Amino acid sequence: MSSKDFIKNKISALEKAMLAAANEEIAGPMSAYMKKKFPFLGIKKPERELIVKPWMEEMKKLDWEDARKASAILWKKKEREYQYIAMELLFKNKKSWNESSLDYFESLVIEKSWWDTVDFIASNLIGNYFLKHPEKMHTCVKKWSSHKNMWLNRTAIIFQIKYRKQTDTDLLLHAIFPHINSNEFFLQKAIGWALRAYSETEPSFVWRFVETNELKPLSKREATRKID
């Protein structure tokens, strides 16, 4: 069986299982929680994981090109659960990533964008990519920090949230400063979240930054939430 047919058959089987589990009563509230930007099948995360687990076992050893193709098919589907599965598929196949993977991750940030996908892509896909390819980090993050797309701005701010002691603080501040006075909720929240995450490693650094810079109230509140 060709890889194309394999992917087609596996996605068809997944779709059949997902449709069988769909729940219209749950779908409405799930869509409302996301400001009705996307339709949902109405499958909550625990149930979705049960459906996806055996499917993912067969899909997690794809090479990069096949993983990308499979995720692209899922990304085009209208129900939001398929985008979640696409991201999980890419993450499970991270051993297959190559230098070109970043371009694809970036394209997903700006397509069907909302915090639920952008935050996963930033912290799990792009964050892990830069640990494997640190030489690309500064150029890309500086580009995203000044980009007109707000979701790329957010990605530049939050991709290091799991880095802890590996956090590049100069790069973090470079991503924050262009948006420190932004009125955009998702950027204010991102700044606070990124600083709060780093405060678990270096609380004094975050406290000094908050005290010496005028942050928006939301950013400051989020940044200092875990500092005694």
Image (cartoon, rainbow, N blue to C red):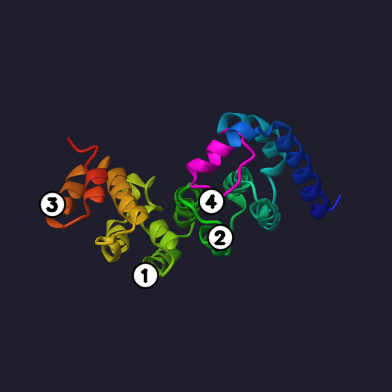
- Residue at x 39%, y 45% (from the top left corner): 162
Quadrant assignment for the C terminus: top left
The image quarter containing residue 156 is bottom left
- Residue at x 58%, y 48% (from the top left corner): 87
Give the image location of residue 23, x and y in percent. Answer: 65, 32
- In the rendered image, is residue 36 in sight? yes
The residue that mark 1 highlights is 146
User: CA gap, disc 1 to disc 4?
Assistant: 26 Å
Say what amino acid the circle numbered 2 marks.
Glu
Q: Which of marks 2 and 3 is nearer the N terminus?
A: 2
Q: Nearer the viewer, mark 2 or mark 3?
A: 2
User: CA gap, disc 4 to disc 2?
Assistant: 12 Å
The residue that mark 2 highlights is 111
Q: Nearer the viewer, mark 4 or mark 2?
A: 4
Does dot 3 land on a helix, a strand or a loop?
A: helix
**Highlighted magenta segment, given as a residue range:** 28-44
